[in-house]
Image (cartoon, grey):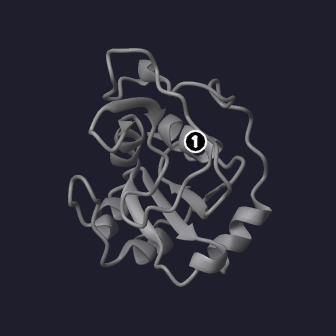
């Protein structure tokens, strides 16, 4: 509830250079396809997303957590899905962290914590069809809960990473 109230009270951030609809910014140096940029589909907001660490900015559907001790507490017992790094240690070390808390009917699902760079790399991978062929569409789902991020949330995480 404290995170959700922080999200609703967060001031709007200035628009990021790539805040509009469109492809992910491969120019950030994130791993990505060498073919055409991927489309970022939009979806209803299923997650409240909070960023913590240097350079964190609030925006549509994204809040900022500034207390490192509180962030480490929220991350206790969680590991990054890609690097398997303990997230409370990463938060205390000042790493850029994404915390995603389910909303609505999925509120019983625990919040997830990710290193922003791992999540941005995940978003930069193309979805696949049922035959394993890459589609020109970016991933937008949380790698653990499969709940979806909105287009603005994906762009905020990628810019933050």
State whether residue 59 is above or below residue 91: above
Which residue of the protein is positioned furthest toward the left in this rendering?
A: 84
Nearer to the camera, 5 or 137 = 137
Q: Position of residue 12 (x, y in %)?
A: 78, 47
Q: What residue sits 31% from the left and 72% below the top?
A: 78
Which residue of the protein is positioned furthest toward the front in this rendering?
A: 131
The part of the image, by quadrant, that contains residue 121 is top left
State whether residue 75 is above or below residue 128: below
Which residue is under mark 1? 156
| Position of residue 143 in the picture relative to residue 1 (left or right) | left
Q: Secondary structure at mark 1?
A: helix
Image quadrant for the C terminus? top left
Q: What residue sits 69% from the left and 29% below the top?
A: 20
| Position of residue 113 in the picture relative to residue 147 (left or right) | left
Q: Position of residue 37 (x, y in %)?
A: 46, 20
Q: What residue sits 68% from the left and 55% below the top?
A: 44
Label 1: few (<14), some (14–19) or many (≥20) C-alpha neighbours in 10 Å: many
Nearer to the camera, 80 or 40 = 40
Q: Position of residue 34 (x, y in %)?
A: 32, 15
Q: Position of residue 94 (x, y in %)?
A: 38, 54
Which residue of the protein is positioned furthest toward the bottom in this rendering?
A: 108
What number of labels is visible? 1
Image quadrant for the N terminus? bottom right
């Amino acid at each position: 509830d404290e995170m959700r109230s922080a999200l609703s009270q967060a001031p709007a951030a200035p628009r990021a250079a790539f805040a509009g609809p469109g492809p992910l910014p491969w120019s950030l140096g994130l791993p990505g396809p060498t073919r055409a940029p991927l489309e970022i589909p939009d979806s209803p907001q299923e997650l409240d997303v909070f960023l913590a660490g240097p350079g964190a900015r609030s925006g549509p559907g994204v809040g900022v957590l500034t207390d490192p001790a509180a962030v480490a507490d929220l991350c206790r017992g969680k590991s990054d899905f890609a690097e398997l790094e303990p997230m409370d240690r990463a938060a205390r070390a000042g790493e850029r962290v994404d915390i995603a808390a389910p909303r609505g009917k999925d509120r019983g699902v625990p919040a997830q914590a990710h290193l922003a760079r791992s999540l941005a790399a995940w978003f930069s991978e193309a979805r696949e069809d049922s035959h394993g062929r890459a589609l020109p569409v970016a991933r937008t789902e949380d790698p653990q809960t499969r709940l979806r991020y909105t287009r603005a949330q994906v762009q905020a995480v990628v810019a933050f990473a």
